[in-house]
Image (spheres, grey):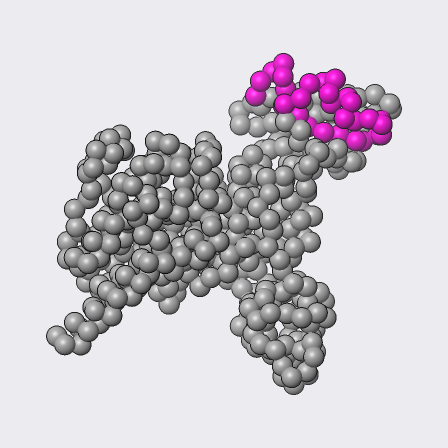
Amino acid sequence: MSLAVGTQCVAKKDHKKPKCGELLYYKGDLIAILSKTMKEGIYLARHSSTGEEGLINATELRERRAIQVNPSLSLMPWFHGRISGPEAVCKLQPAEDGLFLVRESIRHPGDYVLSVSVSGQVMHYRVIYEDNKLTIDYHTFFNNLLDMIEFYSKNKGFIATRLLKPKLKAGTKSAELELAKSGWLLNINKLTVSERIGEGEFGAVYVGNYMGQKVAVKIIKCDVTAQAFLRETTVMTKLQHKNLVRLLGVILGKELHIVTEIMEKGNLVNFLSSRGRSVVNVSQLLQFALDVCEGMEYLESLKLVHRDLAARNVLVSDNNVAKVGDFGLTKVHSKTSDNAKLPIKWTAPEALTKQIFSTKSDVWSYGILLWEIFSYGRQPYPKLTVADVKEIVEAGYRMENPEDCPGEVYSVMGVCWEQEPRRRPSFHKLRHKLIREIRKHQRNLQSA
């Protein structure tokens, strides 16, 4: 097997007793290829957890591959959506004890139905949604459908038979199988979770430890939301850049765990607002701006649109490198809309009014992010309501230059906020503008 430099791999078995110069690793460890050697199939590699470097044989590795962003990838491939009882009966033929599916209830909107084959018949069990819990018998309650299916797969309980075999919805693929095949599925038994470091609308973020490596763990609350976040995960498997938060892997179970590198200094808003001008100088602000721009230029090259670029979604590493994260809304260049709650103050006019999202709408958001950076984490459009912002921006209003922000940087914000998307620069051009500004700033410091 030939491996390219930079390839991320998974160890296929233990190598506990390395010879001199070889790398120590265990089955499931993440390994990065650094360079080829003169010997066929032998590579210099770095252990992703320990940071140690050493030689490794390619036959001991399984290459991680990106997962295609595919709407058919499902955490619940047995969920068939809104179908009738007779349709469910047809799908569960030929009859087989324990063959099952879950569907939306047509007769009782908001509830589900578990349809299961037993003794040549199909039994239908209404799954009632009550007090944020699911139940069939008012005796055993579940947080979500995943919990329910897991329980009845192990216990007969109230229903006529244990759930033995899922009837997969046509065209869907099991997320667990695809993640395992591509090398991104992690082992829950090797993860420990400690203190909470963030709380979002859909779940919490914790500090964790995976096989000796300190990590961040986003735990998604429920199955429907987790299914939506599966898109974020599949997008992140494609991304390898120094200014994008790195995905380490995913754990599936009662909850969805998205495991990423830990960013010790938190998000950029809190970093800037808690330190202020006395600690963070203009040189550091310019570097943060360039870091984000380079990460976005990489997304631009892949024709990916972030759609939620803001300082709250930029994280700062222990050595002050800014990295773009939170890819929950990321899509391939698209004119399609969904029901996601759009961040009004950061969203371009054409995205708000016509649902047109593109790299150029990300550029608009980048201009807002620049304003956040140079105002040390202030909320954009201070003292204005979201409704006011939407109206006055469409009429041509733009925010004023933050205090002490270099004029050239404010002019960059201005071109990002051009009303016509085609008049906004690419991230590639923005990067060159920022590099020129950084060099000019450095010259000014040297001559002062």
Q: Is residue 203 left or right of residue 115?
A: left
Q: Position of residue 66 (x, y in %)?
A: 59, 55
Of all residues shown, which one is farthest toward the top? 107
Q: Is residue 388 left or right of residue 174?
A: left
Q: Is residue 14 visible?
A: no
In front: 317, or 37? 37
In front: 280, or 209? 280
Q: Position of residue 443 (x, y in %)?
A: 19, 73
Of all residues shown, which one is farthest toward the left? 448
Which residue sits at x=57%, y=46%?
A: 69
Which residue sits at x=38%, y=60%?
A: 294
Q: Position of residue 297 (x, y in %)?
A: 40, 57
Which residue sits at x=57%, y=60%?
A: 210
Q: Position of residue 131 (x, y in %)?
A: 53, 24
The image quarter in which residue 45 lies: bottom right
In front: 367, or 404? 367
| Picture layout, residue 206 above or below residue 78 | below
| Picture layout, residue 50 above or below residue 152 | below
Q: Is residue 103 magenta?
A: yes
Q: How many marks?
A: 0
Q: Is residue 94 magenta?
A: yes
| Picture layout, residue 234 above or below residue 432 | above
Which residue sits at x=63%, y=17%?
A: 106
| Picture layout, residue 68 above or below residue 344 | below
Q: Is residue 404 visible?
A: yes
Look at the image and give the residue range highlighted in magenta. 82-110
Q: Is residue 389 left or right of residue 157?
A: left
